[in-house]
Image (cartoon, rainbow, N blue to C red):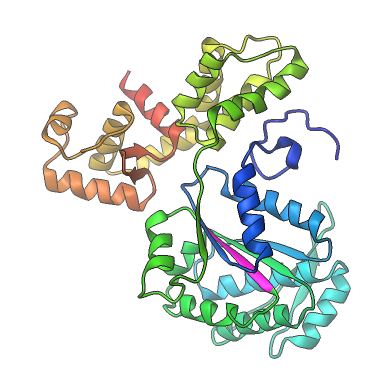
């Protein structure tokens, strides 16, 4: 593949050369999948779960050229029918390299379903779709699993943002998927999710069908020293090097969250004649906040007054252990306790805030910086 103009990838997976560390996590995932274990991968958004999955799949394709790797992001599916269509289209496209052969096989195998094929007008790549009737979604999911089982190839399937199935109006999706997965002898699964409480409930609660059905794996931030070595490997090509104390400043500003570190490094790489110091780190952040300002303004306007006050107060503090504590509420003149509690719950549900053992923090680190500047 042609070398990237900017090696600090913002979105997607561009190859092992541009992938930072995760050596231990990669080997752990490869080992689990090789030994026929399913894995539940849990971490907050923007820590690199999707990139890790793609990195593991890339390694699997090298180690096992005959295997099939299928990545399915279900975040934007709203019901069982949308899940069924997405699942069907990804599986059919992956199981055969020839699109017309794939369509013919699917047409012959699936009963009561008429698949269609279309081509992207820009790159010509094929895609498959089906028109699912209200009574057909469960049958479509079952037949898609059966189609996988019929294959003589090892299949690895990643469902990203898997907790989304708990939001479907149909309450039997978990049980349906669990019952089908256990009867596909040649497929192993990664269930990836960012809403920790939901994922933990799904896989560790006896009340749920996926109870103890997978190995559990969490994803933490990349080691700071390893990340600096990764960054300087590319800055060296520009005749530059970032000092340890300057990278620590950058890393600490965004709590080591992978996507935000990448965004800032991407900006710094764009200006090869500038020093890699705190001043230019801040200038890079200024450019990024300006880039996102319209989106953040719209988001802010959609909040209620109480939500905006609570979110801004937490942003100004950075991290808050007790947002309903008397001192904090008085300092930022927050509303009554019941109103503050309601605003907190709503912001957590909207994923504007994130709560862990260290307290509450604005989920989007750049939004937190933007909110702080509103108070300056």
Q: Residue at x 45, y 80 (%)?
A: 172
Q: Position of residue 17 (x, y in %)?
A: 75, 36
Q: Residue at x 48, y 33 (%)?
A: 294
Q: Is residue 271 above or below residue 252?
A: above
Q: Nearer the viewer, residue 62 or 178?
A: 62
Q: Is residue 170 visible?
A: yes
**Quarter containing the N terminus:** top right
Q: Is residue 327 left or right of residue 8?
A: left
Q: Is residue 230 above or below residue 16?
A: above
Q: Is residue 366 shown in magenta?
A: no
Q: Is residue 66 left or right of residue 194?
A: right
Q: Which residues are magenta?
A: 187-192
Q: Position of residue 201 (x, y in %)?
A: 38, 65
Which picture quadrant has residue 277? top right
Q: Is residue 2 left or right of residue 231?
A: right
Q: Position of residue 168 (x, y in %)?
A: 45, 71
Chief secondary structure of the magenta portion: strand
**Quarter containing the C terminus:** top left
Q: Is residue 276 left or right of residue 371?
A: right
Q: Position of residue 23 (x, y in %)?
A: 64, 43
Q: Is residue 75 visible?
A: no
Q: Residue at x 61, y 67 (%)?
A: 189
Residue sticking out furthest to the bottom: 111
Q: Residue at x 81, y 54 (%)?
A: 62
Q: Is residue 202 above or below residue 351?
A: below
Q: Is residue 80 above or below residue 313?
A: below
């Amino acid at each position: 593949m042609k070398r990237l103009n900017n090696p600090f990838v913002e979105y997607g997976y561009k190859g092992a050369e541009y992938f930072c560390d995760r050596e231990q996590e990669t080997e752990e995932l490869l080992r689990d999948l090789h030994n026929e274990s399913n894995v539940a991968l849990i971490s907050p958004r923007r820590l690199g779960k999707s990139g890790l999955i793609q990195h593991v799949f890339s390694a699997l394709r090298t180690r096992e050229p005959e295997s099939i790797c299928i990545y399915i992001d279900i975040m934007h599916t709203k019901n069982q029918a949308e899940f069924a269509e997405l699942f069907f289209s990804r599986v059919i496209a992956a199981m055969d390299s020839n699109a017309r052969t794939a369509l013919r096989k699917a047409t012959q195998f699936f009963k009561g379903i008429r698949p269609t094929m279309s081509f992207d007008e820009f790159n010509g790549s094929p895609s498959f779709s089906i028109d699912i009737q209200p009574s057909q979604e469960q049958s479509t999911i079952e037949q898609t699993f059966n189609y996988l089982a019929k294959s003589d190839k090892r299949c690895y399937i990643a469902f990203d943002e898997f907790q989304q199935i708990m939001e479907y109006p149909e309450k039997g999706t978990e049980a349906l998927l669990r019952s089908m997965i256990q009867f596909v002898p040649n497929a192993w699964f990664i269930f990836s999710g960012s809403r920790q409480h939901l994922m933990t409930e799904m896989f560790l609660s006896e009340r749920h069908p996926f109870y103890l059905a997978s190995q559990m794996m969490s994803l933490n931030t990349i080691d700071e020293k390893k990340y600096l070595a990764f960054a300087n490997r590319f800055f060296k090509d520009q005749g530059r090097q970032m000092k340890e104390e300057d990278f620590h400043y950058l890393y600490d500003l965004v709590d080591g969250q992978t996507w935000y570190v990448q965004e800032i490094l991407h900006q710094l790489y764009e200006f090869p004649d500038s020093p890699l110091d705190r001043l230019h780190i801040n200038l890079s952040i200024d450019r990024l906040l300006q880039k996102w300002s319209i989106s953040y303004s719209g988001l802010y306007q959609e909040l209620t007054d109480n939500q905006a006050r609570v979110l801004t107060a937490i942003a100004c503090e950075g991290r808050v252990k007790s947002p309903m504590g008397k001192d904090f509420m008085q300092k930022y003149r927050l509303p009554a306790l019941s109103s503050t509690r309601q605003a907190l719950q709503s912001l957590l549900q909207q994923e504007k805030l994130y709560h862990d053992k260290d307290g509450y923090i604005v989920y989007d680190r750049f939004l937190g910086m933007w909110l702080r500047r509103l108070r300056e």
